[in-house]
Amino acid sequence: MLDAQSLMPGTEGINFYQADPTLEQLLKRHLSPDDYERAHPLLLRMGAVASERMDELAAIADRHGPVLRQYDRRGQRIDEIIFHPAYHELERIVYQDFAIAACTHREDALGWSGRVPQPVKFALAYLGMQAEAGVFCPVSMTDALARVLERYGDPALKQRFLPHLTALTLDELQQGAMFLTERQGGSDVGQTATVARRQTDAHKVAETEPWPQWQLWGEKWFCSNVSADLILTLARPSGAPAGTRGLGLFLVPRRLPDGRRNAYMINRLKEKLGTRSLATGEVTLEGAFAYQVGVLERGFIQMTEMINLTRLWAAIGSLAAMRRSLLEATVHTQGRIVFGRRLCDHPLMRRQLVDLLLEVEGCAALAFETTAVLERVDRYG
Ligand SMILES: Cc1cc2nc3c(=O)[nH]c(=O)nc-3n(C[C@H](O)[C@H](O)[C@H](O)COP(=O)(O)OP(=O)(O)OC[C@H]3O[C@@H](n4cnc5c(N)ncnc54)[C@H](O)[C@@H]3O)c2cc1C
């Protein structure tokens, strides 16, 4: 009688990095030999953590998704999201143990001397996302929000928020999000109906806070990481023209400087097919306090910095799902015996596997080339 592993071969215990010679080749192409040597032990460690601990945690966090608690027992609105402890442990692994959101912004993460190169960050994330994509959506937005502030935030805004977005411990960390999509405007963001009104000096929230300050009214329809600490959003200042040209860029903190909740409500969470561990919600901004980011008339252009970087993150996440599926298929067909021989030795199955392999390798080459281009832009402008 065959044991369970021989009957139904699985990927348990397989280090995702060691099982992926293509990733190793791509990194050798895009990194200096020194950087590759430095990255190697980190990748080995992530390959093991992803295939073992993160894989277990992901199964729990996906089964026990986030819950929205709108009221406390006195009937006061609180709009808190409650996550399963497995999700919080995933957060600890990605933000704290592997510094994935911070490592390309800071000079001191992961024992690296200087900033970690973009291909290394994305390779670590790629391995992690083969176990769990949900927790990486907030990571991607925290990373990308920091990039927008670095490029366009005024000094006071950077000083106040960048250390939290790029923190190396969960206690200090403030996570990012972007609330763009409205019911009438997903791709067509120029239809954004959220309005912004500038606060007068009399209403300034705190003297020490960055300025200018605004209040926002509107409805956002698809807000991932809806409980984030810091949110980038687009809104139309009164009197600004229609379309994307009239949109300003604003940073909305979850908490006001005095600790109170900011003025927005989480109406409900989305029922999603994918990224189930992650809270995505619908939000009404009810005069939410916001800081202006950069030049008011260039709001959408500045926002594309975050959209572009999160699209690369989405590409790496999709690639990770493809790679994990290929690994599952390969391991299964190499161990499973049908009609007297291994599944992978049957010609039609072999052809199917080669088709999958070619797609994964082609997409991996393109995605990691893009991470290398991003690194060149960061390094040389
Ligand atoms: C899991 C998930 C998480 C999300 N998280 C966020 C978030 O955190 N923040 C946020 O702001 N939004 C978020 N979104 C929303 C997402 O960004 C929008 O769904 C997206 O912008 C598309 O908008 P839409 O759904 O309104 O589709 P539409 O704009 O209505 O588009 C419908 C279809 O038409 C196609 N289409 C659109 N324009 C054209 C064109 N000119 N030519 C040809 N085809 C076109 C689109 O590709 C799409 O297939 C999330 C969505 C999902 C599924």
Image (cartoon, rainbow, N blue to C red):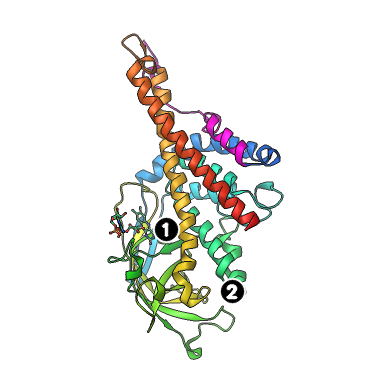
Which residue is located at x 55 percent, y 51 percent? 95
Figure check: 357 above or below 161: above
Figure check: 39 above or below 240: above
Element type at mark 2 = loop
Mark 2 or mark 1: name the one nearer the start of the chain: 2
**Residue 135 visible (yes or no):** no
Please name whichever residue, 285 or 169, is drawn nearer the observer in this view of the structure.
285
Figure check: 369 above or below 177: above
**Residue 38 visible (yes or no):** yes
Look at the image and tell me in which quarter the C terminus lies.
bottom right
Amino acid type, mark 2? Asp
Q: Quadrant location of residue 325?
A: top left
Element type at mark 1 = loop
Amino acid type, mark 1? Asn
**Neighbours of disc 1 within 10 Å: few (<14), some (14-19), many (20+):** many
**Neighbours of disc 2 within 10 Å: few (<14), some (14-19), many (20+):** some
27 lies left or right of 80:
right
Please name whichever residue, 336 or 34, is drawn nearer the observer in this view of the structure.
34
Disc 2 target residue: 154
Figure check: 200 above or below 178: below
CB of mark 1 near ligand 1 (< 8 Å): yes
Which range of residues does the magenta coloring cover?
1-30
Where does residue 203 sit, x and y in percent of width and height? Answer: 47, 87
Where does residue 61 sit, x and y in percent of width and height? Answer: 40, 45
In space, the residues marked 2 and 1 are separated at their CA atoms by: 25 Å
Please name whichever residue, 86 or 211, is drawn nearer the observer in this view of the structure.
211
Quadrant holding ligand 1? Answer: bottom left
Which residue is located at x 50 percent, y 47 percent? 89
Look at the image and tell me in which quarter the N terminus lies.
top left
Where does residue 354 sit, x and y in percent of width and height? Answer: 40, 25
Disc 1 target residue: 225
Q: Is residue 117 magenta?
A: no
